[in-house]
Amino acid sequence: MSDGTEAIGSKRPTIRDVAREAGVSIGTVSAVINQRGLVAEDTKRHVLRFIAELGFEPNNAARNLKRSRISSIGFVVPDLGNPFFASIAEGIQRGIADNDILLMLCITWSKTEREEYFASILRTQRLDGVIYLSGTGLPSSSLLELAKVGSVVFVDEVLPGLDVPFVGSNNLAGARSIARHVLDYGHRRVAIIGGPPRLWTSEQRLAGFRESLASVGLDPDAAPYIAGDYTERSGYLAAARLLAGDAATRPTAILCANDLMAIGVMRFCRESGISIPGQLSITGFDDIANAEFLMPSLTTVAQPAQEMGRAAAELLLHRKGVRPTPPVTTQFPTSVRIRNSVGSLR
């Protein structure tokens, strides 16, 4: 080129390239990268878009040499409307509270393009580490690159093909146990409302439910099954389909893969005049804060969301050299909370 510079693409993009393409000053790009100074939100998003498009990756080595601790981490999460996810976020915050670390939330709403976007932005290493809770079950190319530098910890969900440290609970055992509880109460017409098919938690819980059905001689593949999306609305819509038949042949119990979907089923039953547990027994999974205060209180599987979040934070800090030891455990047990939403047919 006549001005002596090389075309973008012939070398690793620089901060000068980003500034030129975005039409802003180098100082503005630097402020966005380092999260310092007052930069308008529109300008920040504009600059971040060009950082992602150009594949610019700031070299944090010099900055990291100037400090003996990490300053910020990200938490990629589907949403915070799910109380279980919110409790994990609180646990992460508690896990970093003593280290003066900023926690940045990246909410994806379980959309593939948003997971890819955040992974791409985080790959520039403007943050020191990432705790990742996928809502899609699909790894992105940017996440693959991010995982290579050892700054990622998965919590609650595992993604295939990635060798990344994971903090979770025994979903399979929890689902098996609560299904067995329902079967022990005499139920044999049992339906299942599962989670999103690609998610590891969905697969584990469905497998646990079906193992228990098989253990009493039922064909697990014959059990009515609808895949939900872990929202209350999906539970409501699934209940409308499962309970549309004659009362003599419809399910006497529904196993739900999380509490929000179970709440949706309960709402449908309340509106339809179906008594719980007199005419239908319902179970959930997660034991969110209000599960025991529902009418009737929800029988569910408890998993320690806050402890999982704290352990994920501690594991990430250990991997980054901030904590001398890893957390005591990264695989947590589950337990059944027996309440009033399951009735006996015996």
Image (cartoon, rainbow, N blue to C red):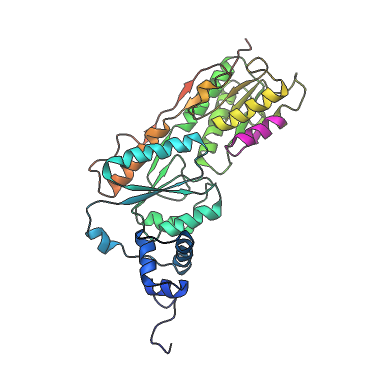
- Highlighted range, magenta: 225-240
Count of marks, rendered view: 0
Does residue 254 appear left or right of residue 57 in this picture?
Answer: right
At 50% from the left edge and 56% from the top edge, which residue is drawn?
A: 116
Query: Of residues 76 and 245, which is closer to you in this image?
Result: 76
Q: Picture quarter containing residue 122?
A: bottom left
For image coordinates 32% across by 65% down, the residue present is: 59
Q: Is 156 contained in the magenta span?
A: no
Judging depth in this view, the residue of 304 and 95 nearest the camera is 95
Taking the magenta stretch, the answer to whether it contains residue 234 is yes
Residue furthest toward the top?
Answer: 346
Task: Classify residue 7 by image quadrant.
Answer: bottom left
> Is residue 191 in view?
no
The single residue placed furthest to the right in the displayed view is 246
Taking the image as drawn, is residue 17 in sight?
Answer: yes
Pinpoint residue 137: horizontal percent, then vertical percent. Answer: 52, 46
Q: Is residue 297 left or right of residue 313?
A: right
The quadrant in which residue 310 appears is top left
Q: Is 30 left or right of 174, judged from the image as shown? A: left
Image quarter in which the C terminus is found: top right
Q: Is residue 231 above or below residue 114?
A: above
Percent x, y of residue 75: 42, 47
Where residue 249 sits: x, y (%)?
74, 21
- Give percent across and percent down for residue 36: 34, 59
Instruction: Say which residue appears at 59% left-offset and 37% top-offset.
Output: 231
The relative height of residue 260 versus residue 339 in the rendered view (above or below) is below
In the rendered structure, the answer to whether residue 198 lies left or right of residue 4 reads: right
